């Protein structure tokens, strides 16, 4: 009789090859921790060491459990009648067991090919001894090898002790012997195993001692720990694949492990800490998912139950209104209970545009960002997530395809929905997960399940979210929001149109002024006036009578005054009452300063000279046209001009008042006519409608519609007239009080908006640059990891080959030197170190020396560090302070070289409160000192204007500030870093 044999490769085929990827594998291990009644399941991933530690504080495994269950494929320990745990810890409630196929433990192979298992069990009688095992999954990849050929080293430790280096070495030796004893073992797999075993040169205590969180195996602790090394090379990609609009693959799978959309009575916390460098680890999945507050604050909330016949019964809340009871039927042709069984649903929905949503704008933007990353309809079985439902790229109900096909009726978008469908193992036995955790099996129960949900969403949209829906609350509120948004947009559009011309004229006037200043046309006009006056004086007839000479002097003075006033008028620019950008505002201030210099230094000088020439003519000819006469003449002329200006404005105001009255009357007439027409239409319909012949329901609907139409028309008219009245009240109050606060407020808001747009444009440019650098850094890190991994693999070859060992040693030392050099720049990246440290001036000066020593030497610039700087200390994030000094020193190096300063020196000093960074180069002009910390301001030829702005912002967040001690072209620059002044 023939017998069936099982190859070792069956383990790999049933385990690693069945799992979709590392995130899915970790999800399976989280489920195992849940089944073990753990309260915490934590992962710590050490990138540089290529080690991942997964720990839970569950009930652990006895030696018998480990050998007869964990090392046995397809056990029935969680199947059918065995689904109840044999031991429930004291004080904990029973949990529904998730695993039932007996292959979830094989998921570890997807994370990494070698694992050290530490487990300690608690049972009714006692705490058991710790069980330690070493498994290399590459054994199960080899062809022509039987399971009986593979030995798994197992050890037991008493009293909660952790395995030391010696014990692990003995297990490594046992695995090596096992590998070498199998003659048919392929060389490539054999070499991989031998190389990986070299990585286990540590004690478990060394690995576990400094881990954050719980340390569950020490003393009287219990639970299971997996130390996995090396990890699969795709793990970094799964973590680092996050973008602005999409969560990383790891996050998308691991967030929402427990159902946070409803109160789930499962005390289990999941964590994944990424130890990317020497600083604080980054928690990846802790606070990423939705909470109940976000669900309840969304625009629409729907929850209820589908019974065993597929009929929905629940509540619908539209735009935060009181939930309404609602029933949705499903066409159950055979009137038989469904195969999928009863299940529940609860989900929230957010409108696609902020203008259509009642969620506050800040909350809306944050929620929309989270929806892009984690939005979707999740599936939970007994409170635990079923994969891959909920992932943004798994639209299993085809919402988006339906919207593309029939956009007018398919309301729901998968990208705007977040919520949960809840099933149970006992109530939905035929909704069974696939072995590879790629969804539910597509059997009859699943097809009914999908059909019921598709029918539900179609009918829900028809009942509530279409313009033809009987329940029109959604369209009523949406229409009102749209109307308000359209009015705002139209008002902004009108305002922008009205001010666009004013802005363009204003900017053109300033541009023209500086052009005239550049080509000296203003001073040419002044010279022409001066020459004309002096020529007329020189050519005046000496034989004229006194009366003719007096008339000549008066006319000449009037001519000069007229030309002079015209010149001042030509260079005078009035600032319009519109919002201006930072650039235009700076141009305005530059214009004011330039105009004042022009008037004071040139125009007034020439005016004095012309006045003096006229006075001398009057004096030399003994005329009675004194300076007093001339001043009086000028005042009379100014008075006439002022009176003319006032009269012109009065005429404009009177015309404006007449026009305003006409507009108000016409506006009121049109609105009154509109209201009257509405009432007439209702009256006409009333006269045509045989109310007594209608049944009570229809009659009630007709009268209700009439009443609503009248009330809506009244509300619209009332709002219209109230806004007119409020506008008039504002104008009257401001004119009567001499205060124009509303126009000033409008201009201030517009200016702020212009500045925001300007800054946003600049930020976008730098964000693009940052993204490019991020991509380069991302790829570079992978290259470094690959080099490091290959050097580690080379070590095992070097140990057995003396010549190769020398080569290995040289490569390893060179790479270590390169890596150490690159890590000098790690503080520049804020993400690399998130722990505050006591940083001394000595630390900072050493850092500056390491970064710039070549520049100091090449440009012959001295770095002078005084004792006060060495002694000064501050508690701050390294990533917040080092870049500030790098920027200041880099700027100093540039300007010292630019100006060719002899004996160039950069000096670092300090006292009890502050750091001082100075150099002996040229100072900073007063007008520049007012802008050096502004975004985008730079005097360098290739400057971007970011450094000092970012430095100041960063220091301010840490309650420090940076300032220039004193401005002035002849004052050597000195920057001060000190605690931020309170208040």
Image: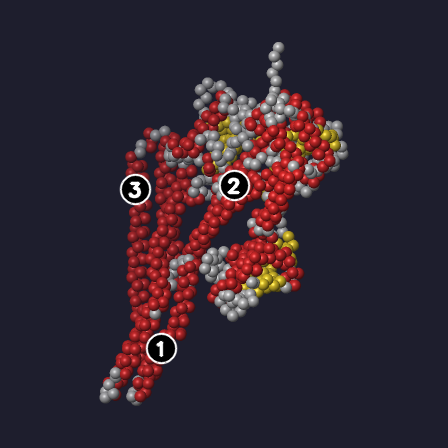
Quadrant occupied by the N terminus: top right
Residue situated in front as seen by the camera: 823 or 485: 823
User: Which of the two discs, 1 and 3, sits closer to the camera?
Assistant: 1
Q: Position of residue 354 (x, y in %)?
A: 44, 44
Eyeballing the image, is 515 above or below 273? below
Quarter-wise, where is residue 507 in the image?
Answer: bottom left
Q: Which residue is mark 3?
A: 680
Mark number, residue 606: 1
* Sequence-earlier tag: 2 or 1: 2
Image position of 930 with respect to 632: above or below: above
Upstream in sequence: badge 1 or badge 3: 1
Left or right placement of residue 864 versus residue 553 in this view = right
Which type of secondary structure does the marked residue at label 3 adopt?
helix
In this view, the residue in front, 642 or 432, is: 432
x and y, in percent, of residue 298 in the image:
49, 40
Residue beneath disc 2: 242
The first of marks 2 and 3 along the sequence is 2
Separation of marks 2 and 1 at Cα, in angstroms:
69 Å
Sort mark 1 into few (<14), some (14-19) or many (20+) by Cα contacts within 10 Å: some
Q: Quadrant of residue 746?
A: bottom left
């Amino acid at each position: 009789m023939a017998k069936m044999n099982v190859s070792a490769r069956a383990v790999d085929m049933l385990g690693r090859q069945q799992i979709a990827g590392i995130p899915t594998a970790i999800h399976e291990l989280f489920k195992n921790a849940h089944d073990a009644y753990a309260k915490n399941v934590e992962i710590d991933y050490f990138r540089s060491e290529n080690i991942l530690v997964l720990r839970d504080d569950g009930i652990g495994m006895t030696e018998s459990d480990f050998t007869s269950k964990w090392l046995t494929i397809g056990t029935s320990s969680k199947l059918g009648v065995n689904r109840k745990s044999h031991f429930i810890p004291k004080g904990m409630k029973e949990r529904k067991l998730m695993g039932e196929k007996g292959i979830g433990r094989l998921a570890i192979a997807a994370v990494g090919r070698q694992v050290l298992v530490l487990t300690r069990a608690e049972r009714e009688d006692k705490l058991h001894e710790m069980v330690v095992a070493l498994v290399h999954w590459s054994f199960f990849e080899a062809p022509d090898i039987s399971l009986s050929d593979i030995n798994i080293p197992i050890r037991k430790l008493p009293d909660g002790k952790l395995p030391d280096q010696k014990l692990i070495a003995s297990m490594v030796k046992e695995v090596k012997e096992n590998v070498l004893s199998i003659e048919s073992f392929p060389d490539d797999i054999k070499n991989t195993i031998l190389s990986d075993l070299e990585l286990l040169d540590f004690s478990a205590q060394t690995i576990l001692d400094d881990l954050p969180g719980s340390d569950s195996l020490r003393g009287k602790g219990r639970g299971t720990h997996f130390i996995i090394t090396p990890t699969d090379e795709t793990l970094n990609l799964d973590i680092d694949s996050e973008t602005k609009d999409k969560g990383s693959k790891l996050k998308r799978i691991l967030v929402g492990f427990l159902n946070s959309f409803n109160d789930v009575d499962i005390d289990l916390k999941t964590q994944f800490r990424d130890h990317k460098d020497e600083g604080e680890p980054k928690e990846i999945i802790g606070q990423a998912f939705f909470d109940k507050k976000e669900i309840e604050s969304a625009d629409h909330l729907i929850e209820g139950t589908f019974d065993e016949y597929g009929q929905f019964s629940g509540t619908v809340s539209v735009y935060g209104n009181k939930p309404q009871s609602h029933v949705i039927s499903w066409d159950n042709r055979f009137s038989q209970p469904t195969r999928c069984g009863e299940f529940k649903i609860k989900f929230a929905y957010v409108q696609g545009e902020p203008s259509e949503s009642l969620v506050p704008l800040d909350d809306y933007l944050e929620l929309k960002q989270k929806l892009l990353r984690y939005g979707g309809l999740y599936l939970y079985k007994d409170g635990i997530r079923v994969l891959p439902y909920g992932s943004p790229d798994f639209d299993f109900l085809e919402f988006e395809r339906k919207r593309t096909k029939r956009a007018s009726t398919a309301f729901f978008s998968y990208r705007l929905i977040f919520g949960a469908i809840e099933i149970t193992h006992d109530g939905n036995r035929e909704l069974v997960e696939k072995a590879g955790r790629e969804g539910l099996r597509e059997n009859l129960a699943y097809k009914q399940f999908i059909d019921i949900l598709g029918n539900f969403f179609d009918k829900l949209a028809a009942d509530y979210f279409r313009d033809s829906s009987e329940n029109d609350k959604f369209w009523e509120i949406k229409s009102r929001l749209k109307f308000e948004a359209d009015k705002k947009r139209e008002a902004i559009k009108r305002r922008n149109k009205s001010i666009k011309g004013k802005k363009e004229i204003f900017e053109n006037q300033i541009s023209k002024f500086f052009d005239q200043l550049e080509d000296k046309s203003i001073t040419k006009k002044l010279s022409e006036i001066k020459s004309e006056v002096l020529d007329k004086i020189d050519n005046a007839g000496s034989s004229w009578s006194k009366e003719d000479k007096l008339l000549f002097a008066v006319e000449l003075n009037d001519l000069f005054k007229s030309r002079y006033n015209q010149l001042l008028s030509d260079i005078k620019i009035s600032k319009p009452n519109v919002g201006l950008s930072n650039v235009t505002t700076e141009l305005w201030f530059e214009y004011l300063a330039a105009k004042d210099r022009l008037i004071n230094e040139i125009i007034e000088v020439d005016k004095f000279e012309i006045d003096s020439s006229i006075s001398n003519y009057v004096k030399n000819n003994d005329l009675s046209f004194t300076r007093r006469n001339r001043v009086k003449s000028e005042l009379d002329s100014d008075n006439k001009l002022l009176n003319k200006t006032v009269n012109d404005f009065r005429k404009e105001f009177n015309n404006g008042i007449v026009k305003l009255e006409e507009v108000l009357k016409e506006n009121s007439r049109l609105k009154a006519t509109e209201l009257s027409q509405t009432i007439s239409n209702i009256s006409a319909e009333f006269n045509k409608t045989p109310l007594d012949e209608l049944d009570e329901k229809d009659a009630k609907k007709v009268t209700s519609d009439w009443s609503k139409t009248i009330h809506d028309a009244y509300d619209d008219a009332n709002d219209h007239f109230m806004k007119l009245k409020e506008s008039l009240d504002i104008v009257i109050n401001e004119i009567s009080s001499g205060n124009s606060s509303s126009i000033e407020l409008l201009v201030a808001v517009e200016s702020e908006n212009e500045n925001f747009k300007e800054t946003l444009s600049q930020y976008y440019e730098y964000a693009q640059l940052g993204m490019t650098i991020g991509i380069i850094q991302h790829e570079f890190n992978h290259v470094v990891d690959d080099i490091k991994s290959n050097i580690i693999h080379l070590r095992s070859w070097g140990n057995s080959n003396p010549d190769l060992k020398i080569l290995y040693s040289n490569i390893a030392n060179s790479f270590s030197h390169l890596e150490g050099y690159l890590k000098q720049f790690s503080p520049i990246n804020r993400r690399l170190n998130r722990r505050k440290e006591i940083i001394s001036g000595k630390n900072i000066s050493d850092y500056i020396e390491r970064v710039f020593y070549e520049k100091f030497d090449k440009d012959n610039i001295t770095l002078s560090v005084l004792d006060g700087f060495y002694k000064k200390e501050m508690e701050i994030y390294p990533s917040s302070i080092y870049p500030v000094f790098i920027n200041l020193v880099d700027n100093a190096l540039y300007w010292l070289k630019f100006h060719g300063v002899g004996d160039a020196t950069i000096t670092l000093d300090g006292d009890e409160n502050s750091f001082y960074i100075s150099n002996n180069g040229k100072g900073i002009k007063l007008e520049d000192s007012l802008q050096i910390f502004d975004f985008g301001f730079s005097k360098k030829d290739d400057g971007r204007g970011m450094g000092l702005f970012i430095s100041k912002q960063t220091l301010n967040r840490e309650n420090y500030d940076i300032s220039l001690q004193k401005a002035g072209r002849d004052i050597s620059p000195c920057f001060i870093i000190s605690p931020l002044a309170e208040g």
